Amino acid sequence: MAAPSGIALPRATERKRGTRVRSCIECGKIEQVRADNAAQRCRSCSSRASAAERFGRPTVKPNYETCQHCRCSFVSSPSNRQKYCSLGCLRAAKSVERTCATCGGSFRIARSVLSDRTNSSGRFCSRSCYERHLCRTPRIRGRGSRWKTIRKAALRQTPFCAFCGRTRHLQVHHIIPFRLTRDNTPTNLIPLCRACHKRVESVFHDVEAVDPPLPVTKLVLFCSIHARRTVTLHLLKSSAHADQRAAA
């Protein structure tokens, strides 16, 4: 049907392009909507109100929670009980910023990954930095012609890890590295498990980076490690006596 002459009908595609700021009358959410949108509620509150009218249920007031990271208030489902307002806050709260021990760069790592069982946990930004840290000093293959005999004697003298007391998968550690002293005497050897061996070597690398005098390093490490072995031996004996009394 043609329009009367002199009257211009608005086209269907023409819409008001203006916008306005709307504050929801129920939850207070502020958002930008089209100027021709007369609704006074946000989309979630409108859906909640329409469902209440349809099923005859009372309108549920929005549940507010406080983000445990940024401390801002946000709307959450009462059954969900969210702790964080966004995924970014969740990641920031579950991670910690560390400094790489090799390159000195900062990086973030999940708190759940941090552990004292390995010397690489939370100390290096990448595998390459970890390998560079372990190989920054010259390596010497072999421990002398009688190393196998010396190693068996050290394990026979102390058949447990000097730090944790484990008796399986033991390795013989040089308190002062063999590359520095060529020392295979019993006072310089201590059996350790794999995990404790890595931790002790990492501590020595950190001490070596400070470059203290070698006699001072020997005195400190010898006293601390052998004292720790004595404490571990006492704990193992006490545990064995307790098991014997319990069995009797």
Image (cartoon, rainbow, N blue to C red):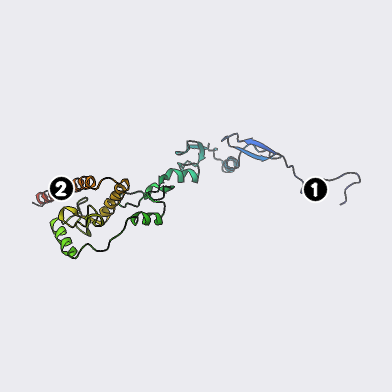
**Label 2 crowd bin: few (<14), some (14–19), many (20+), radius 10 Å:** few
Residue in the picture at 66% in, 40% down:
33
Q: Position of residue 191 (x, y in %)?
A: 20, 55
From mark 1 to mark 2, how far is it between C-alphas? 93 Å
SS under mark 2: helix
Task: Name the N-terminal-most of marks 1 and 2.
Answer: 1
Q: Name which residue type carries label 1.
A: Arg
* Numbered tag placed on residue 143 in the rendering: none
Residue 230: mark: 2
Name the residue tied to disc 1. 11
Q: How many marks?
A: 2
Residue at the farthest left position: 248
Q: Is residue 149 placed above or below 28 in the rendered structure?
A: below
Q: Residue 220 sits in which quadrant? A: top left
Tell which of 44 and 162 is nearer to you: 162
SS assignment at label 1: loop
Which of the pair 154/175 is nearer the observer?
A: 175
Measuring from the top left, give residue 123's x and y in whole percent.
37, 49
Task: Tell me the residue at 26%/53% (across/down).
Answer: 196
Cβ atoms at labels 1 and 2 below 8 Å apart: no
Instruction: In this rendered view, identify the residue nearer to me: 68 or 100.
Output: 100
Q: Residue at x 32, y 55 (%)?
A: 137
Amino acid type indicated by mark 2: Thr
